[in-house]
Amino acid sequence: MEELLEVLQDIKDDVDFETCTTLIDDHILDSFDILQLISSLNDTFDISIPASEIVPENFNSAEALWKMVQKLQEE
């Protein structure tokens, strides 16, 4: 999870990712941030995020992102 928080901070360093649960709903992350995040997550965690996983529920919080990363690493 620590590594994920570092990736998120690299993309937007003025957000408290540990407590924020509305990253998409409140437009904290824009579409460019999401593309950058997907690329970073793929590289950092050696996963491939399929289009079916690119939904707001998976990107609204660091915790949701972490659950998605863990699920994809198991596959």
Image: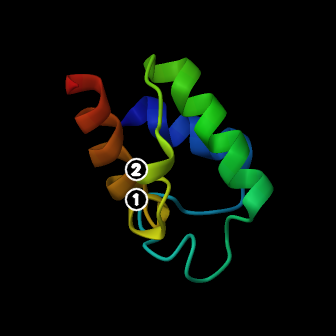
Residue that label 2 marks: 65
SS under mark 2: helix
- Quadrant location of the C terminus in the rendered image: top left
- Quadrant location of the N terminus in the rendered image: top left
Image: 67 above or below 24: above
Mark count: 2
Labels 1 and 2: the sequence-earlier one: 1
Question: Is residue 25 at all visible to an observer of this figure?
Answer: yes
Q: Position of residue 63 (x, y in %)?
A: 33, 55
Residue that label 1 marks: 58
Question: Residue at horizontal 70%, vertical 46%?
Answer: 35
Question: Of 58 and 5, which appears nearest the observer?
Answer: 58
Question: Residue at horizontal 43%, vertical 52%?
Answer: 52
Image: 26 above or below 43: below
Query: For the residue marked with disc 2, what is the amino acid?
Result: Leu
Side of 75 where 46 appears, left or right: right
Q: Quadrant of residue 2?
A: top left
Image: 50 above or below 15: above
Q: Position of residue 55 (x, y in %)?
A: 47, 63
Q: Residue furthest right?
A: 32
Question: Is residue 13 at all visible to an observer of this figure?
Answer: no
Question: Of 22 and 32, which appears nearest the observer?
Answer: 32
Query: For the residue marked with disc 1, what is the amino acid?
Result: Asn
Residue 46 circle label: none
Q: Quadrant of residue 73?
A: top left
Question: Residue at horizontal 63%, vertical 63%?
Answer: 15
Q: CA distance from mark 1 to mark 2?
A: 5 Å
Q: Quadrant of residue 16?
A: bottom right
Q: Position of residue 12 (x, y in %)?
A: 72, 53
Q: Residues within 10 Å of mark 2 (few under 14, many from 20)?
A: some
Residue contact at pointers 1 and 2, CB within 8 angstroms = yes
